[in-house]
Image: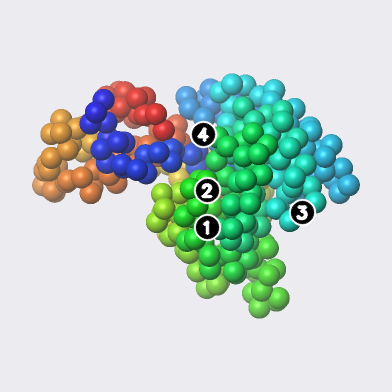
Amino acid sequence: MQNHPREVLLGAQARTGQLPVCDHYSGIPSRMVQSLQLQAELTQEFGTCVIDVTLDCEDGAPVGREADHAALVADLAAGSADNARVAVRVHPLDHPAFADDVRILLGKAAGKLRHIMVPKVESYDEVERIARQVDDAGGSHIPLHVLVESPLAVHRAFTIASHPRVASISFGLMDFISSHGGAIPDAAMQVDGQFSHPLVVQAKLQIASACHAYGKTPSHCVVTEFNNDEAIARAAVQASRQLGFTRMWSIHPSQIRPILGAFAPNDSAVLEAAEIIAAGHKAHWAPISHNNRLHDRASYRYYWQVLERAHATGKVVPVNIHAMLGTDAG
């Protein structure tokens, strides 16, 4: 389809693909297995894979047994279903376990990994070094997601986002606050404080803006109040509708549905977007009038992205639009 909306409206950005809005982390062996099972259940329920499962080799590995943990993660990833979306978080580049993580994981599971998350990335040059090691281990096809966790890294967010191997940047809230030597109070680590402290909000906006500048995915940090559904829902709404994030971390199964709900467009928005895109497609993307408002390619682009987000979050879309989404190679 030569005038497919994704190619016509998004152009070069179409190559980055659409990531699920929720990235679910687990590092304890039993919970990693449960996370993969949960992903399969949600895929069946929603009709599409609505979460990534990232198996954690950084915080999940017992000290001194990092290689054993990496081998366990590699086995889980290698044994996952073909339609699963499985990723791994490795140790930072300067950690002694980084090289072993990369060697062990890619040696067994390179064909199954959707991305590799690398924490504590500080610069473009570090991404270059990470990419070389990943490539040498057989992972040249695997996108890199990076975690920005310091004031200097936030300052360099645009440069980091410009690296062609970086597909997404996440914000490391806890380390960012800790790196300020007490200048930011611990209240900023909590759900309300992280959306009100100026330095934290500024950092989030910097990361989101950098990602959008280069067609990458900005991923919002964790909410530690994992037993408070109202708190995670409120945070997800603020992250997606005020700060420009299109993806968010989950660290507990109870956080997944509130994130999906907050990042999904509502039914009326989906219907309006479907009507506008169908009319624009019929007009070969020439300007149209819809409900007495002018629409052209600038607004078509917005409404197509609403439909992509609806599809990625398991929302029902009209049949004609679903057919377009089904031809999307991204």
Q: Residues within 10 Å of mark 3 (few under 14, many from 20)?
A: few
Identify the disc placed on residue 160. 1
Q: Quadrant of the C terminus?
A: top left
- Asked if marks 2 and 1 touch (Cβ < 8 Å), the reply is yes
Q: CA distance from mark 2 to mark 1?
A: 8 Å
The reply to whether residue 187 is visible in this rendering is: yes
Q: Secondary structure at mark 4?
A: loop
Count neighbours of disc 4 (C-alpha within 10 A) and say few if under 14, some if 14 to 19, many if 20 or more. many
Which residue is label 3 attached to?
A: 95
- Marks 1 and 3 sit apart, C-alpha to C-alpha, by 20 Å
Closer to the camera in the image, 111 or 77:
111
Label of residue 166 in the image: 2
Say which of marks 4 and 3 sits in front: 3
Residue 24 vertical placement versus 154 (above, below): above
Q: How far across and how far down the image is residue 303, in percent? A: 28, 42
- What's under tag 3, amino acid-wise? His
Q: Secondary structure at mark 2?
A: strand
Q: Is residue 64 left or right of residue 108?
A: right
| Circle nearer the N terminus (2, 1) | 1
Q: Which residue is mark 4?
A: 50
Badge 1 amino acid: Ile
Q: Which x, y percent locates residue 25?
A: 66, 42
